[in-house]
Structures are given as C-alpha cells and as structure tokens.
Image (cartoon, rainbow, N blue to C red):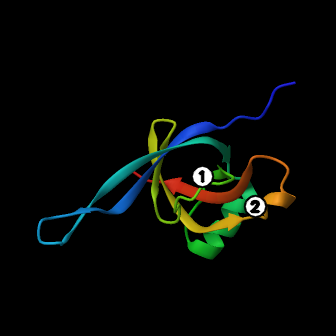
Amino acid sequence: MTRIKGITVILTDKGIIKEDELGSPIYGERVICVENVLVAPASSDEILSTTNLYGKKAVYTLAIPKGDKNVWEGQEVIFFGRRWRVFGKEMQGIDDLIPLDWNKKVYVESYE
C-alpha cells in the first residue's frame, strides 16, 4: 500500500528581513521551503465559491502539514515551476480530530 506524500513548495515571505545601522527596517523576500504539501486542482464547487466570495478564481488547493507555523495568507508560493498567490483565509481543522498529516487548507490563483 502506498502512503500519501506531498511535494515541496517554496513559500516567499515578504517583510522585514533586518534593520540598518540607524534601526530602520529593511524589507525583502525570505524563501521558505515547506515539505509535504498536498496540491490538488480546485473542484468546480470551490472555483465557484471562491469567485463569489473573493472575486478570484482558485486554480489549486494546498493542504498544509500539521505543525506548520508560517503565514500563508497573501503570500506567493512556487511549485510546478510557476508562481502562485495565496488568497482568502487559511482554513484549519483540529489536529486531534484529523487522522492524516494535514490540517490547513488554502487556495491559490495564477500569478505571474
């Protein structure tokens, strides 16, 4: 029997990366590799509901592994050789009630 395994997704976190000599923030992009992320095409129901709620078309749904502390909302992700943007809120379940390794779900749209 084969076990379900996700792929490595690159999360680009934009924000303060350090401070200069005067204490002013320096903004930049930090690259974070997140392993074991499930990537699935968005269903027609998800496409319709995200278009109605957010005005954006979901292309893929990402399942985030348990224990991940990264902020996904509004960030860019890279997988399948393309850049995508996460939109909407992270949907999270209760860890103890979910039997598999993933407990969060986010939607991504095409971004170039």
Choose top left, top right, bottom left or bottom right for residue 93.
bottom right
- For the N terminus, give its image quadrant: top right
Q: Residue at the spot x=75%, y=46% of the render?
A: 101
Q: Where is residue 48 in the image (x, y as percent from the top left)?
A: 69, 65
Query: Which one is nearer the viewer's eye here, 46 or 88?
Result: 88
Within 10 angstroms of label 1, few (less than 14), some, or many (20 or more) residues? Answer: some
Q: Which mark is residue 59?
A: 1
Q: Where is residue 102 in the image (x, y as percent from the top left)?
A: 73, 50
Residue designated by label 2: 45
Query: Which one is nearer the viewer's eye here, 54 or 64?
Result: 64
As helix, strand or loop, the secondary structure at mark 2 comes to helix
Query: Which one is nearer the viewer's eye here, 77 or 33?
Result: 33
Instruction: Identify whether 108 is placed above or below 6.
Output: below
Would you say 44 lies left or right of 81 here? Answer: right
Residue that lies at the very extreme toward the top in this rendered image: 1
Q: Residue at the spot x=53%, y=56% of the render?
A: 109
* Residue type indicated by callout 1: Val
The Cα atoms of the two marked residues, 1 and 2, are separated by: 12 Å
Q: Where is residue 47 in the image (x, y as percent from the top left)?
A: 67, 60
Sequence-wise first label, 1 or 2: 2
Q: Which mark is residue 51?
A: none
